[in-house]
Amino acid sequence: MKTLLVKDYRILLTQKKSLILILAIGVLMVISTMEIDFLVGYMMMLAMIMSAGTINYDELDNGMSFLMTLPASRKGYAIEKYVFTFINTVLCGLVMFILYLVTKGFINWGFETIEMLSVSVGWICGIMLASAILLPLYMKFSAEKRRVIILILWGAVAAIIYSIQKVVTMASNGVGGDKMAVVNDLLAKIETFNPIVIVAIIIGIVILSIAVSMLISIRIIQKKEY
C-alpha cells in the first residue's frame, strides 16, 4: 500500500499548479466574508474529487495492467484509494483550520474557534460518506461517465443540503402545520441526546458505510479485466 500511496502523491504533484491555485483561492475566501463552514466543505470536496481522479491516471495507456504486475493486489489497490482519500480529506480540513486560526482564530479565540473545529470534523464525516458512494462508481465506470457522475453527485449533495436547511428553517418558523411540528419534535428529541452519543452514532454510520463501500469496490476491481 505504501508504494501505491507514493504513486498517487506523485500524481498529485504533477498537478501542483492546480493545487497552488486551489490553496490561494482558499486563503482569499478565508480572508473574505464568505461563510467558513461552506468553504471547508467546498475545499474538502475538491480534495476528495482530486483523490478519486487518480483512478483516471491509473487507467491511462493500460496503466492498470502494469500496476497489477507490481507487488500490489487488486484488494490492496481498492483499499488504498479509501486510505488516500481519507488522508487528503483530513489534511485539507487541517489546512483550512490552520488558515482560519492564522487569519481570524488567534484574534477571536474562543467559541467560534471550537465551532470551526466541529464544522471541520463534521465535514470530514460527510465527505467520507460521499466518497463511499463516489469511489465504487469511479471504479465501475469509464472516464467519460465519471464526469457525469461528478455533476450528479454535486447536484445531489447541494439538493440534500438545501432541502435539510429548508425543512429546519420552516420548522423553526412554525411554517408547514402538523408536518413541521413532527420535525420540531424530532429536533427537540435530538437536542436532548448526549453529544457524545450523537458523535458515536455518526462515526459508526460513517465507518459502516465505508466498510460496505470498500467491499463493493474490491468486488468491482476483482471482476474487471486488465
Image (cartoon, rainbow, N blue to C red):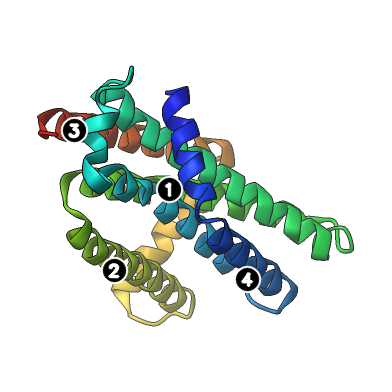
Measure how far apart labels 2 and 4 are at the Cα level.
Answer: 21 Å
Q: Which residue is mark 4?
A: 25
Q: Residues within 10 Å of mark 4 (few under 14, many from 20)?
A: few
Q: Report the amino acid beneath label 4.
A: Ile
Instruction: State yes or no: discs 1 and 4 in contact (Cβ < 8 Å).
Output: no
Q: Is residue 188 left or right of residue 214?
A: right
Q: Is residue 46 left or right of residue 212?
A: right
Q: Report the amino acid beneath label 1.
A: Ser
Q: Secondary structure at mark 2?
A: helix
Rendering quarter of residue 101: bottom right
Q: Secondary structure at mark 3?
A: helix
Measure how far apart labels 3 and 1 are at the Cα level.
Answer: 17 Å
The residue located at (11%, 34%) in the rendering is: 224
Q: Secondary structure at mark 1?
A: helix
The residue located at (70%, 53%) in the rendering is: 97
Mark with earlier residue (3, 2): 2
Which numbered circle lies on residue 151?
A: 2
**Residue 204 in sight in this render:** no
140, above or below 203, in the image = below
6, above or below 179, in the image = above
In the rendering, at what x and y percent does residue 108 appear? Answer: 86, 63
Q: Which residue is mark 1?
A: 51
Residue situated furthest right in the rendering: 107
Q: Report the amino acid beneath label 2.
A: Leu
In the rendering, at what x and y percent does residue 170 appear? Answer: 41, 78
In the rendering, at what x and y percent does residue 71 appear? Answer: 33, 17
**Residue 99 in sight in this render:** yes
Mark with earlier residue (3, 1): 1
Q: Which residue is mark 3?
A: 221
User: How many numbered markers are drawn?
Assistant: 4
